[in-house]
Amino acid sequence: MQQPCACNQWRSIACIAVATALLGVAFATNPLVPDNGAWVGVSIDWTTWASVNDYVQQAEFQPTSYTIFISVPLDVQDKGLLDNVVPQIAALGGMAIIVAQPTYGLSEITTAAAETFANIIAGYEEQGASMLIEFGHEMNGNWYAWGQQPSEYIKAFQTMSTAIAKYCCRSFMLWSVNSGGGYPYPNGTDIASYVSTSDFKLLDTNGDGSITMADDPYAPYYPGDDYVDWVGLSLYHFGTTFPYDQNVLPEAQKFTSTIFGTFKTSYVDYTTLPNFYEVYSAPNGTHKKPMAIPETGALWDLNQLTGAAPTELQVKTAWWQQVFNIGGDTTNALDLSVHMPNLRLVAWFDQKKEESSADNDMIDWRYSASSVIHDAFVAYIGTKDSNGNKYWNTLPQFISHIGKVTTTVTSSSGATETCLSSSSGSATNGTYADPLANIGASGATATAVMSVSSLIGAVLLCMLLL
């Protein structure tokens, strides 16, 4: 069993952070946060590709992260998938996003089960893997076994987070919801018929005796800042009307306005939604966590091909021009480097699959669906900002970043571990300030200043630790 990282080593790291602060260098709070801009990742079908290298060769760009969906507790098949894929990602120097799904029920996530899983994850760390553990994603929806059960979900998330923190030092917890548009996603079913009385009270955030889009679709499921390292939101472009299977262009600024709770058209009104970015990620917001879009893509329904406009290329291009825009505000898309500087990872869903939300039609979400679409996507994420800086970081930038945040830790038994510590925030491929270094300041470019009282307190803490 892998031992937790040695306390003395973490005390030393804490004191190094204090010393660095005294020198005026601001530390990020999470070592997987890029120094500048955001990571670009993908979610691929592991039954399609023989290896990660095969995917990279066809992609003609090197994604930072690869997503793997598994069930917890692990079964033999999913353990085999992890054993096959995670070492490949580690060998490339990339990051794995492990979507840990409590498929057998939240009650199965006991301390023992969580620690068993955490020890398996720690074993991959010994092979050089860096990971985000996305536990029970889209828990605010009703399409998974763990959905819309806030009390049990929070308990299970906290149990898993505690185990990961105990046994791992290169892995971090990602809490990721589904976009609140359409919440509570009833599809003709009364939520009161399957939600417990106590959970109903938690979900009825405005206290009006019913659960509708007027209620907060995110806050009842939040496990707490002590257990969450990253926050995320799944956000796709679907069709306009139920069953949402129309191949149509996305509305102007749909991506950001859905996140901000300002999206409104003649057929939907999402203006009752909270501003997810402002509450959970903005440097001057409530929780100040780095944000990911762990799943995104634009619907192309293979059952609805009529030959009429728009084309697949037009639909997908219009969406990624919103999801990855850093070229200034336009009528179609806001500049994310300005309006969402703490959005630090976007993973494109590069798969095709049947979607229940689209009448069980086969949907091709892939940017790699054709060479024309693929080439346009790769070219767009390579676009530099108005200052000529690279913003959407791929594998080379990740490898460089990890090299700067890697530290060797000695456990109480004398064994050594290669862990990740906080980033210095020094630029590697641009001039973007790390928003996490500016907590409490106004705007992404504000200067991080540590108050005298904070410095004194930090120094006293360091003295006590040593």
Image (tube, grey):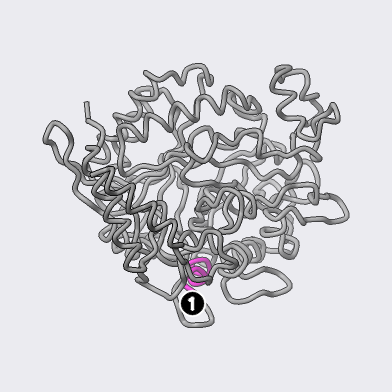
Residue pushed farthest right? 266
Residue placed at 41% from the left, 60% from the top? 34
Percent x, y of residue 224: 54, 37
The crowd level at tag 1 (other Cα within 10 Å; few <14, some 14-19, many 20+) is some
Q: Is 464 positioned to the left or the right of 106 in the image? A: left
SS assignment for the magenta stretch, majority: helix
Q: Verify whether residue 205 appears in magenta.
A: no
Q: Which residue is mark 1?
A: 384
Residue placed at 61% from the left, 54% from the top? 285
Q: Quick check: 291 above or below 249? A: above
Could you say which is closer to the camera, residue 196 or residue 375? 196
Numbered circles on residues, count: 1
Name the image quarter holding the N terminus.
top left
Label 1 is placed on what type of residue? Answer: Lys
Q: Verify whether residue 381 appears in magenta.
A: yes
Q: Which residues are magenta?
A: 375-384
Percent x, y of residue 389: 45, 77
Residue placed at 74% from the left, 58% from the top? 248
The part of the image, by quadrant, that contains residue 80 is top left
